[in-house]
Each structure stands twice: as C-alpha cells, then as structure tokens.
Amino acid sequence: MERVRLEFPEADVRHRHGLTVRVTDMNYGRHLGHDAVVSLMHEARVQALASLGLSEGDMEGYLCVVADLAVQYQAESRWPDALMIETAIPAPSRKSIAVYHRLRRESDDRSVATARLNLMLIDPDTGRPAPVPATLADRLMGND
C-alpha cells in the first residue's frame, strides 16, 4: 500500500502554540507516544479556535466533533523537548472543516509529526450533522 504524504498548508496557518513534552507523554519506546501527540494537538486546536473567538463546544451554536484523523511521524521527540505546534485551517468545505497540525521540535526546527483531521458540526438539538455556516467559514479564514 502506497503511503500518501500529508502536505501541511503553510499559507493557512492560523495559530502557533508552544508546549513541552512531559515525562508522562513518553511511551515504552522512550519517546512521545501517539496518545500524547493527539492530546497535544487537541490542546493546540483549542487554543487556535480560542484565538478566533471560537470553542469546540460552541461553533456558532453547533458542537464540533472530530470525524477522522491521520497522523504521520517524521522524528522522535522525548522529555523535555519544547515543541511548537502550528495549526492551519484551509477554507472549509460545505460539510467539514479540515484542520492541520504540525509539531516541530524547537531545538532543531525538525518536524516531529504532521496531522490532518476533519471536524464536523453537530446540531445540539437534533444530534445530526450540520453544514458549515458561511459566517463560521469567514471567521475560520480570518475574514470576520
């Protein structure tokens, strides 16, 4: 099976957030574990949305859930590495919001991991998926 490389959309970076690898983020291989990578990305995504005046629990009246996630690893990271997590958000589609994260080790600027996830909006009253409102798309693009 051919592996498709995730391309990080540099032009769509909306936020940068620094975090440090904690000793509890280490796995049996003595490097940053997958579960910790997902948690670090979640923290960075929450911070990125907050910088746009949004939250996962209220995206203009809708809830936000991760529909899928792909992570590709480029290098190992260990305690106590300082990481910079960049969050990029390209123009949303009608039904989902793509979010990219890139974790870079600050000591040598090497990419540790690149990820892409798709967020879906859920109507809190019906529990059903909802289309991305144009006003939300504009906010995500920094056009508000």
Image (spheres, grey):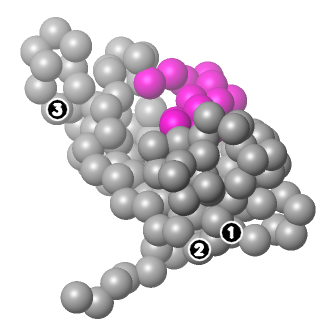
Mark 3 or 1, nearer chain start: 1
Residue drawn where x is 70% and y is 37% of the image: 22
The answer to whether residue 37 of the structure is visible from this angle is no
Q: Which residue is mark 1?
A: 111
Q: Which mark is residue 122?
A: none
Q: Which mark is residue 129?
A: 3
Q: Is residue 130 above or below residue 113?
A: above
Measured Cα–Cα span from mark 2 to mark 3: 34 Å
Location of residue 29 by image quarter: bottom right
Location of residue 110 by image quarter: bottom right
Under tag 2, what secondary structure? Answer: loop
Callout 3, which amino acid?
Pro
Mark 2 or 3, nearer chain start: 2
Q: Nearer the viewer, residue 80 or 42?
A: 80
Mark 3, other Cα within 10 Å: few <14 / some 14–19 / many ≥20? some
Q: Position of residue 121 (x, y in %)?
A: 28, 31
Q: Nearer the viewer, residue 46 or 53?
A: 46
The image shows a total of numbered marks equal to 3
Report whether 95 appears left or right of 27: left
Mark 2, other Cα within 10 Å: few <14 / some 14–19 / many ≥20? few
Measured Cα–Cα span from mark 3 to mark 1: 34 Å
Which stretch did the figure color magenta? 39-56
Mark in the foreground, 2 or 3: 2
Q: Which residue is mark 2?
A: 74
Taking the magenta stretch, the answer to whether it contains residue 61 is no
The answer to whether residue 116 of the structure is visible from this angle is yes
Looking at the rendered image, the quarter that the C terminus falls into is: top right
Taking the magenta stretch, the answer to whether it contains residue 42 is yes
Q: Label 2 near label 1: C-beta < 8 Å?
A: yes
